[in-house]
Image: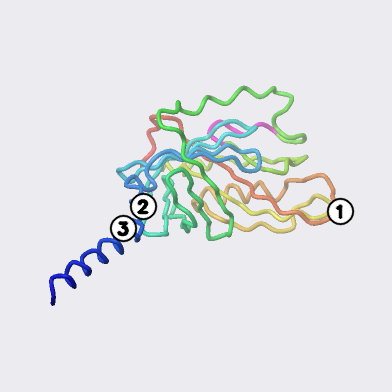
């Protein structure tokens, strides 16, 4: 090849290389960090640790509940295991430096924003006036149980923390999809996630809930958090 041809080839190669934009480097921290969101009146704060641990704090009108556990992140799949529960699977629809969009197997989407670096931990929930809690026709949940629901019921029968679960150190979150009839009664309940013992306790209470009548059938998600006191002597 002639020297002129070699020089022209090198110049074209440099121009082509310069014209190809470099791919942005992947966020090395990935999912690790603290993410926040607010859905249906409930504030959610999730922290994924570099060691595979996670903590989820939910704050609503009924108070604040925190659940801890482990997680596994592979590609666009996220498996979360709250303490005492089986794995809950999510699909990662979007993962950017400041945004994380998760979709559960039930189709419910959670759009999270990364908390600013150095942001202080969530402030304790403000006390709720006794007149505002619980819903009319119900008694206050026992200690260690927090109930979160978007459509507030007129009558709310609260579950009882199973003694066997307490002894075994079982805690976690139960999520139920509840279909409400026009007259406000419960039409159908589907279990979205939760430990078997805690689900059974929840299903012993939620079917007796009653909402205000409406013109059509409604669907809501009931979240019930069972939390043992710090330092519980139950088996883990």
> Which is nearer the eye, 236 or 113?
113
Q: Secondary structure at mark 2?
A: loop
Please report the bounds of the magenta region as a residue range. Answer: 139-145
Q: Could you tell me which residue is drawn at 55 percent across and 49 percent down?
A: 110
- Whether the magenta-drawn stretch holds residue 142 is answered as yes
Q: Is residue 120 left or right of residue 106?
A: left
Quadrant of the rendering where the N terminus is positioned:
bottom left
Local crowd size for mark 2, using a 10 Å CA cut-off: few (<14), some (14–19), many (≥20): few
Indicate the position of residue 224 as horizontal and vertical percent values.
Answer: 58, 43
Tell me where residue 14 sits by quadrant.
bottom left
Which one is in front in this view, the residue at disc 1 or the one at disc 2? 2
Relative to 121, does residue 52 appear above or below in the rendering?
A: below
Local SS, label 1: loop
Name the disc covering residue 24, or none. Answer: 2
Q: Residue at label 1?
A: 215
Indicate which disc, 3 or 2, sits on the residue closer to the N terminus: 3
Q: CA distance from mark 1 to mark 2?
A: 51 Å
Quadrant containing the C terminus in the rendered view: top left
In the rendered image, which residue does mark 3 sit on? 18
At x 71%, y 40%, the residue is 156
Q: Is residue 233 above or below residue 204?
A: above
């Amino acid at each position: 090849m002639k020297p002129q041809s070699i020089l022209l080839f090198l110049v074209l190669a440099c121009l082509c290389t310069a014209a190809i934009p470099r791919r942005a480097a992947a966020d090395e921290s990935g999912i690790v960090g603290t993410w926040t969101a607010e859905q249906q009146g409930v504030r959610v704060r999730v922290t994924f640790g570099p060691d595979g641990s996670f903590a989820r704090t939910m704050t609503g009108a009924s108070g604040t509940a925190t659940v801890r556990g482990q997680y596994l992140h592979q590609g666009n799949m996220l498996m979360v295991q709250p303490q005492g529960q089986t794995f809950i699977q999510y699909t990662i629809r979007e993962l950017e430096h400041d945004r994380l969009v998760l979709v559960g197997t039930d189709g419910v989407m959670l759009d999270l924003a990364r908390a600013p670096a150095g942001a202080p931990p969530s402030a304790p929930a403000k006390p709720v006036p006794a007149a505002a809690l619980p819903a009319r026709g119900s008694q206050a949940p026992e200690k260690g149980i927090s109930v979160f629901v978007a459509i507030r019921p007129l009558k709310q029968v609260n579950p009882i923390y199973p003694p066997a679960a307490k002894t075994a150190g079982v805690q976690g979150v139960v999520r139920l999809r509840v279909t409400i009839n026009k007259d406000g009664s419960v039409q159908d309940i589907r279990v979205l996630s939760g430990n078997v013992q805690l689900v059974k306790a929840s299903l012993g209470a939620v079917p007796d809930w009653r909402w205000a009548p409406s013109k059509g059938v409604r669907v809501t998600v009931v979240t019930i958090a069972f939390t043992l006191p710090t330092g519980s002597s139950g088996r883990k």
